[in-house]
C-alpha cells in the first residue's frame, strides 16, 4: 500500500512538470495572409529543443512550413508559395521520438492568390 501511495505522489508531482513542457501557440500575426507571407507566432516552449517542425493543417492536408526564427516564446515561419487558399490550424511536431503532432488553437486564413 505504501508503494502505491508513493508512486501516486511521485506521478502527481511530475504531472505539472510534463504539462509545462508542452509547446503551445497562443496567437499568430497576421491571421489572414497570402502565400509567401511571414507569420509571427507567440506562445510557450516553442524553441528548437522542443519543436522539430511546424505545419499548417486543414484537418486533411498538412503543409510543412519553413521556420525562419525560433525562440522559447516565439517563432516565425513563411507560408509556402504553393499553399492553397483556405483555413488552417498551426500544427507543431515535437522533438521527442516518435514526434507528437500538436494541433494548435489558432487559425490562419490563407487568401487566394492569382497563381491558384
Image (cartoon, grey):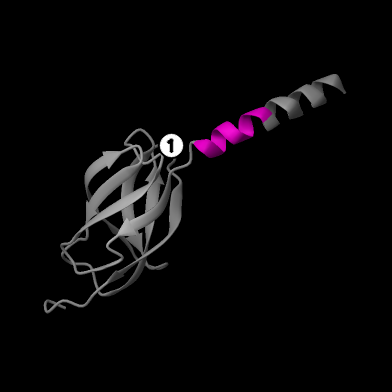
Magenta-colored span = 13-20
> In the image, is 16 to the left or to the right of 20?
right
Examine the image and state in which quarter residue 31 appears: bottom left
Q: Measuring 29% from the left and 46% from the top, which residue is drawn there?
A: 75
Residue 73 x/y as whole percent: 35, 41
> In the image, is 48 to the left or to the right of 3?
left
Q: Which image quarter is the N terminus in? A: top right
Residue 47 x/y as whole percent: 33, 37
Q: Measuring 55% from the left and 39% from the top, which residue is drawn there?
A: 19
> In the image, is 101 to the left or to the right of 49?
right
Task: Give the residue pinned by disc 1.
Answer: 97
Q: Give whichever of 72, 94 is nearer the camera.
A: 72
Q: Measuring 35% from the left and 37% from the top, which residue is drawn there?
A: 72
Q: Give above or below for 36 relative to 101.
A: below
Q: Which image quarter is the C terminus in? A: bottom left
Residue furthest left as drawn: 115
Q: Give whichever of 26, 35 is nearer the camera.
A: 26
On whether residue 17 falls in the magenta region, the answer is: yes
Classed neighbour count for the residue bearing mark 1: other residues with Cα under 10 Å, few (<14), some (14–19), many (≥20): few
Labels in figure, total: 1
Q: Measuring 74% from the left and 26% from the top, which residue is drawn there?
A: 9
On whether residue 57 falls in the magenta region, the answer is: no
Residue 38 x/y as whole percent: 19, 57
Amino acid at each position: 500500500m505504501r508503494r502505491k501511495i508513493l508512486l501516486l505522489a511521485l506521478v502527481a508531482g511530475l504531472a505539472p512538470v510534463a504539462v509545462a513542457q508542452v509547446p503551445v501557440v497562443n496567437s499568430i500575426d497576421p491571421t489572414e495572409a497570402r502565400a509567401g507571407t511571414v507569420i509571427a507566432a507567440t506562445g510557450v516552449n516553442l524553441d528548437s529543443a522542443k519543436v522539430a517542425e511546424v505545419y499548417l493543417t486543414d484537418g486533411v492536408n498538412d503543409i510543412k512550413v519553413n521556420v525562419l526564427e525560433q525562440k522559447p516564446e516565439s517563432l516565425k515561419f513563411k507560408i509556402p508559395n504553393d499553399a492553397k487558399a483556405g483555413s488552417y490550424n498551426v500544427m507543431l511536431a515535437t522533438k521527442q521520438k516518435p514526434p507528437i503532432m500538436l494541433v494548435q488553437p489558432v487559425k490562419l486564413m490563407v487568401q487566394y492568390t492569382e497563381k491558384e
